[in-house]
Amino acid sequence: MTNNQQDSLLQQLDAMSSEARNPDSWDIDLLSSLEIVKRINAEDQTVAQSIASCLGQVAAVADRIVEAFDAGGRLVYLGAGTSGRLGILDAVECPPTYSVPSSQVVALIAGGNGAVYKAVEGAEDNPQLAVEDLQGIKLQPNDILVGIAASGRTPYVLGGLAYARSIGCFTAAISCNANAPVLSAADIGIGAVVGPEVVTGSTRMKAGTAQKLILNMLTTTAMIRSGKVYQNLMVDLHASNEKLVARAVRIVMQATDCAPEIAREALKAADMSAKLAILHILSGQNIEHCRQQLQQQHGFIRKVLQQGTAQ
């Protein structure tokens, strides 16, 4: 990097609130452990409020994710460093929680899978790498790409957003700085301005928390609106271990107010599908009939019950 390039980057960093020095933590190196964690906790409490101002954009992106899913498309996250790792975390938790295929929510990180555990030098500075990564997963116009960048200037993310838009793919971006380049580079920008970190520039802290909260909102909202939740119960979870089997039994009990043995019998008959078991118990109809009705109502238990088609 030339001196001119470094000067340009320094100017960009100077303009970012997430890179500013926090006046409430200038003396943090003099504090006891309890005093330090109190300062961190006080800053963390401001994060949720910083997101409140952009909930309209979060909801709009969630709506587009639902549309993408309905059209057979995917949600694709793209990020570098902490931002990329948070995208991966959200993506890998969707299949066991909502029984979606692992191909439905995909996450890419600058530098590839190895960057999950160890920084890959220079990867985030190369916009062409994002293009190659997106081409590698065969990004399609019916997918939705969400670029994640705390700084809002990551070249890898900017390159990915530009490529996605060039092929007609809907794009969104998440940043923790106002007027960040990624926000204007996407169809919808979500700017959660969390302000200076307790440790200057350590954006894995408040910025990382804000990004995690937003990603939680995006996928949870999309899954609820895709019929993956009944009342507030995750009825499409994949019971892949003993804890989740017990949770499935409990979910059926909570949804139907039935005894444990009734829940277990219904789950067994429904091949461990909590959704099917619930509808079977509530409607009194056989499993195959319930399966057909759920298919007709795109997996929404409430729609089946409200329309009386399970009766």
Image: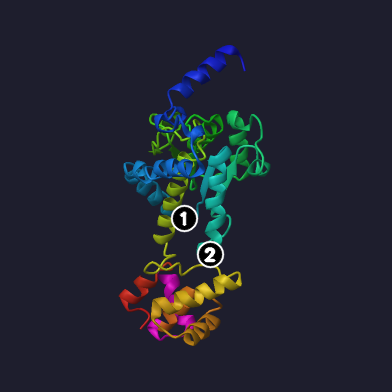
At a point 40% along the width and 50% down the height, the residue shown is: 62
How far, Cα to Cα, is label 2 from label 1? 14 Å
At a point 52% along the width and 83% down the height, the residue shown is: 264
Nearer the viewer's eye, disc 2 or disc 1? 2
Give the camera-side residue of 159 and 231.
231
**Residue matched to label 2:** 99
**How far from the left and from the top, in percent, is residue 219?**
45, 54
Decide if residue 273 is in sight here. no
At a point 37% along the width and 74% down the height, the residue shown is: 304
**How far from the left and from the top, in percent, is residue 215?**
46, 49
Secondary element under disc 1, as helix, strand or loop, is helix
Q: Amino acid at mark 2?
A: Ser
The magenta segment is 282-297
Q: Which mark is residue 69?
A: 1
Q: Is residue 196 magenta?
A: no
Above or below, 127 against 282 in this view is above
Tag 1 or tag 2, which sits nearer the N-term?
Answer: 1
Q: Residue furthest top?
A: 4
Decide if residue 295 is in sight here. yes
Q: Quadrant where the N terminus lies?
A: top right
Give the camera-side residue of 39 and 243.
39
Q: Amino acid at mark 1?
A: Phe
Give the camera-side residue of 189 and 47.
47
Q: Quadrant where the C terminus lies?
A: bottom left
